[in-house]
């Protein structure tokens, strides 16, 4: 959810009021026949307007609890599958770990989730069942619903338009998808809070304010009312309002708490720019104030050439004494931010950084080994993890499989091999998928099968989405449990290099 997204003035319990009074807006009872013109020509009728009450943060998210959800009616023992819901969002973190590389963050946020998290086993609340029915209905027409949502948002609330990038090509789906993903988590407050807290903190960099949230809620309901004609009812709208009220409050609370201890963004001067290949650069920056993060995390980054366009990049080293931060950036075709960083950025340029995010970090309370798979520029956070283990001074075995298409694309192999020579507990194996090589040949996940056993290792994956998916399948197949496979949200990888 990469831009503003709600809370309730009706109370801090997430209910949003009762018996038709839903706090910051009033549910519609019938459709109007007018609609704004907007990006989608389908938006030819105006959604009903709703009065909006002031919204203010009301207490800490940790102190808020949802009311007990209403049980699903007996005949709903097999409600519609949530897997048929809205298009993939920046997926929330799984109970064990989030996935790489995010999240509109994600933060953060998302993904390969544990089996059964959204399974309809008869215990889902009535609100969850109603929400999932709506999502199943709009899934085949998700593009139309998204376009209509933004048409409503920008026509009815034009003051919000400057919070978004000038071109909405990659931004267009992210806010709407994240809203739907959060709503799907209505029955799991712990995961919902974790997911949304990161988003609430991250949205501070856009200038999002509490008073912006109701507008997004109105337009969400307006879009769903317009297109979910088969499942929409007063009860369904009430379920969405309650879910969105909870979503809003969690995000506003998280942003308010974060404001007490961190800036919304950091200015950072480029102090180093090393072109490793024609399309890969190592960019080093100096933040204008201390920037706390952990090895394995990532941040969102904005360049002066593309205002309000943020992309995610992993830190390429553990925290350094000099406070400098490094990123490995690959310019991709039509990639606005990545191309600017690789081909245009020079020392002296100033970029902006969002807050750190991601949980692909080392658990230093255990002596388990680390099995690390890094594909392409995904080797950057793997390198940071190796440095983190070294700094803690414990001889834990670390096995790194570094994948690329050719030997030429192993742009950081010399650094990794020097680390292996320095630390006896570290092993680095290059894996090349195309062409001759002095290392291992084939796909990165397949190479892992040739070694092991890995039952005493925690796994870390960083790289393109396809590599993450196949890697997770491989690791599960060789017996590594899901809670010991760590990476950041897959959907973030799609735009991480733009």
Image (tube, rainbow, N blue to C red):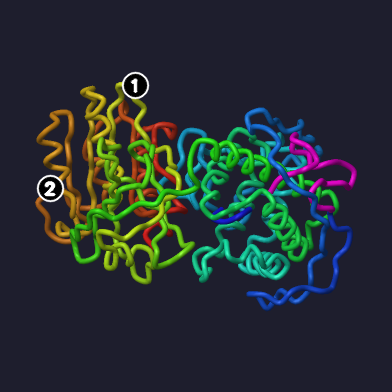
Q: Which quadrant holds residue 14? A: top right
Give the number of marks. Answer: 2
Please tell me whether residue 148 is drawn above or below residue 180 in the rendered image. below
Circle 2: is it few (<14), some (14-19), or many (20+) Cα within 10 Å?
A: few
Magenta range: 6-26
Whether residue 425 is visible, yes or no, is yes
Q: Mark number for residue 414? A: 2
Closer-to-camera residue (411/480): 411
Name the residue carrying label 1.
366
Whether residue 476 is visible, yes or no, is no
Quarter the C terminus occupies: bottom left
Q: Residue at x 52, y 63 (%)?
A: 171
Based on the picture, tell me whether residue 21 belongs to the magenta stretch: yes
Q: In the shown orientation, is residue 23 left or right of residue 428?
A: right
**In x, y percent, where is residue 231?**
78, 57
**In x, y percent, where is residue 7?**
71, 45
Q: Mark number for residue 224? A: none
Q: Secondary structure at mark 2?
A: helix
Based on the picture, tell me whether residue 314 belongs to the magenta stretch: no
Circle 1: is it few (<14), some (14-19), or many (20+) Cα within 10 Å?
A: few
């Amino acid at each position: 959810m990469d831009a503003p997204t709600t809370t309730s003035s009706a109370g801090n319990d997430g209910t949003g009021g009762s018996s038709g009074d839903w706090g910051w807006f009033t549910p519609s009872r019938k459709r109007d026949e007018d609609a704004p013109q907007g990006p989608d020509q389908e938006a030819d009728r105006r959604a009903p307007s709703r009065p909006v009450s002031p919204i203010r943060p009301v207490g800490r998210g940790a102190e808020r609890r949802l009311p007990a959800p209403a049980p699903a009616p007996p005949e709903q023992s097999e409600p519609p599958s949530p897997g048929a819901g809205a298009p993939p969002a920046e997926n929330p973190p799984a109970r064990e770990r989030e996935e790489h590389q995010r999240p509109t963050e994600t933060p953060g946020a998302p993904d390969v989730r544990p089996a059964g998290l959204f399974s309809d086993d008869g215990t889902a609340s009535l609100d969850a069942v109603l929400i999932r029915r709506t999502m199943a209905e709009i899934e085949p027409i998700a593009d139309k619903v998204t376009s209509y949502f933004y048409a409503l948002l920008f026509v009815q609330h034009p003051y919000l338009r400057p919070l978004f990038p000038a071109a909405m090509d990659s931004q267009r789906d992210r806010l709407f998808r994240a809203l739907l993903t959060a709503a799907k988590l209505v029955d799991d407050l712990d995961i919902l809070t974790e997911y949304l807290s990161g988003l609430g903190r991250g949205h501070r960099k856009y200038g999002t304010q509490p008073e912006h949230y109701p507008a997004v809620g109105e337009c969400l309901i307006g879009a769903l009312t317009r297109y979910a004609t088969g499942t929409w009812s007063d009860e369904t709208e009430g379920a969405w309002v309650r879910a969105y009220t909870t979503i809003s409050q969690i995000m506003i609370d998280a942003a308010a708490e974060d404001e007490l201890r961190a800036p919304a963004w950091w200015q950072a001067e480029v102090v180093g720019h090393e072109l490793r290949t024609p399309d890969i650069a190592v960019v080093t920056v100096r933040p204008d104030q201390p920037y706390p993060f952990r090895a394995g995390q990532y941040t969102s980054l904005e360049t002066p050439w593309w205002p309000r366009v943020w992309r995610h990049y992993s830190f390429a080293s553990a925290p350094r004494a000099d406070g400098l931060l490094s990123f490995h950036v690959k310019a991709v075709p039509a990639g606005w931010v990545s191309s600017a960083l690789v081909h245009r950025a020079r020392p002296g340029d100033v970029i902006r950084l969002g807050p750190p995010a991601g949980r692909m970090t080392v658990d230093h309370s255990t002596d388990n080994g680390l099995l690390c798979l890094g594909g392409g520029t995904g080797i950057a956070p793997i390198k940071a993890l190796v440095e983190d283990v070294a700094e803690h001074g414990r001889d834990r075995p670390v096995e790194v499989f570094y994948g690329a298409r050719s030997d030429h694309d192993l742009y950081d192999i010399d650094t990794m091999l020097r680390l292996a020579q320095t630390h006896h507990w570290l092993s680095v194996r290059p894996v090349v998928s195309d062409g001759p090589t002095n290392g291992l040949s084939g796909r990165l996940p397949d190479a892992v099968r040739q070694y092991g056993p890995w039952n005493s290792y925690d796994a870390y994956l960083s790289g393109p989405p396809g590599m993450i998916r196949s890697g997770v399948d491989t690791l599960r197949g060789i017996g590594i449990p899901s809670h010991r496979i760590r990476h950041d949200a897959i959907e973030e990888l799609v735009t991480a290099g733009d």
